[in-house]
Image (cartoon, helix red, strand yellow):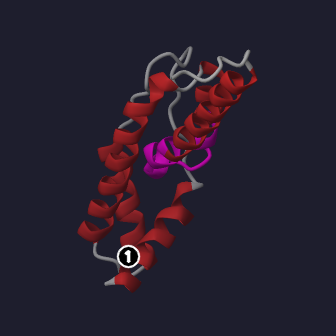
Amino acid sequence: MAAMRFAVALVLIAAAGSATAQTPAGGDALPGHDVDAACAALADQSTKSSNTPRNVALNLCLQEEQEGYDTSKVLWGRVSAPRRRECLQHASGFGQANYYRALGMCLEAKSAVEDNEREMQQLRSKPQGFRY
């Protein structure tokens, strides 16, 4: 089963570069994306290019996109607009079927960077002194 999941993942990655993702105007709202259609197209393509059953490829794609969407939804408002735009560009490079997965991973990284920057800014401020 692990070998099949690996094979499906490789097909997903290979197919990802052949499509472009939608991006919102302005970047203020989490972008919409037709995951059902994108995953169905990818499942059709993977069925033709490998021995992967269509439903396996479809369900794996939908699962990964759902996880990416859920992560993106939580982090979207926490990350600055310039970094969200960077993530949208990044996700667009992964294609339709891996859009939310790539977006979520990017937002996780950018959120961690911004958390570290905030912490460093607090550490640079005037020392508060020890409180008993």
Can you give x and y, in whole percent of width and height, for residue 39 in the image? 35, 53
Which residue shows up at 44% across the image and 77% down it? 6
Where, quadrant-wise, is the N terminus in this rendering? bottom left
Residue 95 within the segment the image draws in magenta: yes
Q: Amino acid at mark 1?
A: Arg
For the residue pair 60 and 37, the one nearer the viewer reads as 60
Can you give x and y, in whole percent of width and height, for residue 84 in the image? 58, 28
Direction from residue 109 to residue 70 in the image, left or right: left
Residue 118 within the segment the image draws in magenta: no
Q: What is the residue that sits farthest to the left in this orientation?
A: 55
Q: Is residue 60 above or below residue 27?
A: below
Q: Is residue 100 above or below residue 9?
A: above
Q: Is residue 68 above or below residue 10?
A: above
Can you give x and y, in whole percent of width and height, for residue 87 in the image? 60, 36
The magenta region covers 89-104
Q: Which residue is mark 1?
A: 5
Which residue shows up at 52% across the image and 42% down it? 108
For the residue pair 60 and 52, the one nearer the viewer reads as 60
Which residue shows up at 52% across the image and 61% down it? 15
